Amino acid sequence: MQLIPTVVCLFMATLIAACQSSEKSEKDPAAIRLITLDPGHFHAALVQKMMYEGVDSVVHVYAPEGQDLQLHLNKIQGYNTRPDNPTHWKEDVYKGADFLDKMLADRATLGNAKNVVVMSGNNRLKSDYIQKTVGAGFNVLADKPMVINASTFDQLKESFATAEKNKVLLYDIMTERYEISTMLQRAFSRQAGLFGTLEKGTPGNPAVTKESVHHFYKDVSGSILTRPSWFMDVAQQGEGIVDVTTHLVDLVQWECFPEQIIDYQKDISLTSARRWTTDMSLSQFKAITKQNSFPDYLKKDVVNDSILRVYSNGEINYQLRGIHAKVSVTWAYKAPAGAGDTHYSIMRGTKANLVIRQAAAQQYKPTLYIEAVTGNKDLEASLKAVLPKIQQEFPGVEVKKVASGWEVIIPSTYKEGHEAHFGRVAQKYLDYLKAGKMPTWEVPNMIAKYYTTTQALELAKKAK
């Protein structure tokens, strides 16, 4: 008998909180307002999986009417109505073919808030979206990749210059920096007594290797993800070598040369690059898009009238300040039972190797190992010496002896999952926005990252 009053109370509490948040932002010139532009990828919704202090609960959405927009709104509604820790976003939606012009024209009427345009969708359009948006004086938080080919690389550089001129922040969503095993790999690599120094490596045996495996058919927020048909069109989404590898190239820079400026013209040298396809049947395509046939723009990639070939896989072998690194991404259609997207990474030091494995032996959970190099008999002693320093930053982290060396034991409280990392990135960006600036290394390193990926694509296309 108490169910209806309880539900009413919860509804009223949520409504009051939403109204208070909106009223506060209208009176507070320091408040921040989110604007979503043409959401075509589920990452746009993941930014709103949580609420943020000082951010208006009203989000302005500008997009063409269609399935992409509806899927986005459905996800936001799901977050608002979930039983545990529901959000209270209110989506103010403008639908129309002139959505971009409308957003730019509304710049003066959106209030005194610091406006942040969130972009996650068709990557072919993103370069123009970014350029026009920062040019109009909006801050931009963009999903990767910002550019998908060498022809738009200079346009991205210009956009960063425009953002600086207009005193707005342009930033991409690098979620993998917040994966705890990667954070600890970076932290242990900075302990010279344990790790030594980073090896130089060779093309055949790089000092740093990062491999990522992804899947077209996947579960997101408790349901099977419906992907837009254009996601399989590399002319719109981008090839794998310029898409997911963006994360891996970012991690190489972030871990090997933390908080240091990378000069793409001096510090980066490509050795080799290659690309290959993932083949998808029409029935598989239907399962993830809910479309009954391949659209015309995909016909160029269809063989035998029934098999779609997607250039979703790529590998880059390159040097960064003389350090040999290799990054690769592979897309399968569907993961084995109990598995999901996986990551493998190794940093080779002169005293120890830091290895992340995420296979069946690890129950498909990323696990960090510390392994002695040949001839190093002091690993246990040096590990015990540096562990207290690690624990100062990551309380509760321990190690245990295993056959290959030492496994890093990570408390479950650090294991948030990939979807939660979008909130971490957004919060970091909001902190930058409130401070009015980013660290000096962020922009040049974003430029270096996209130079690496787009030039690798050019090199891969030339390779036989």
Image (spheres, rainbow, N blue to C red):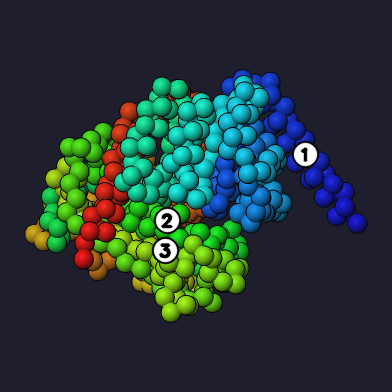
Disc sitting over residue 15 in the figure:
1
- Circle 2 SS class: helix
Can you tell which of label 1 and label 3 is closer to the viewer? 3
The residue that mark 3 highlights is: 214
State the image coordinates of residue 345 (x, y, percent, origin top left): 29, 58
Amino acid carrying label 2: it is Ala
Kindly report the distance in space between the C-alpha atoms of the residues bearing marks 1 and 3: 39 Å
Amino acid carrying label 3: it is His
Q: Could you tell me which residue is drawn at 37 percent across and 58 percent down? A: 240
Confirm whether residue 54 shows in the render: no
The residue that mark 2 highlights is: 235
Q: Nearer the viewer, residue 454 or 262?
A: 454
Q: Earlier in the sequence, mark 1 or mark 3?
A: 1
- Circle 3 SS class: strand
State the image coordinates of residue 380 (x, y, percent, origin top left): 20, 55
Instruction: Work out whether 436 lies above or below 342.
Output: above
Amino acid carrying label 1: it is Leu
Mark 1 residue crowding within 10 angstroms, few (<14) / some (14–19) / many (20+): few
Mark 3 residue crowding within 10 angstroms, few (<14) / some (14–19) / many (20+): many
Q: Could you tell me which residue is drawn at 66 percent across and 50 percent down? A: 65
Q: Could you tell me which residue is drawn at 45 percent across and 60 percent down? A: 233
Quadrant of residue 357 in the image?
Answer: bottom left
| Number of numbered discs on residues | 3
- Circle 1 SS class: helix
Q: Earlier in the sequence, mark 3 or mark 2?
A: 3
Kindly report the distance in space between the C-alpha atoms of the residues bearing marks 1 and 2: 43 Å
Instruction: Work out whether 221 lies above or below 164.
Output: below
Q: Nearer the viewer, residue 66 or 51?
A: 66
State the image coordinates of residue 391 (x, y, percent, origin top left): 35, 44
State the image coordinates of residue 196 (x, y, percent, origin top left): 15, 47
Mark 2 residue crowding within 10 angstroms, few (<14) / some (14–19) / many (20+): some
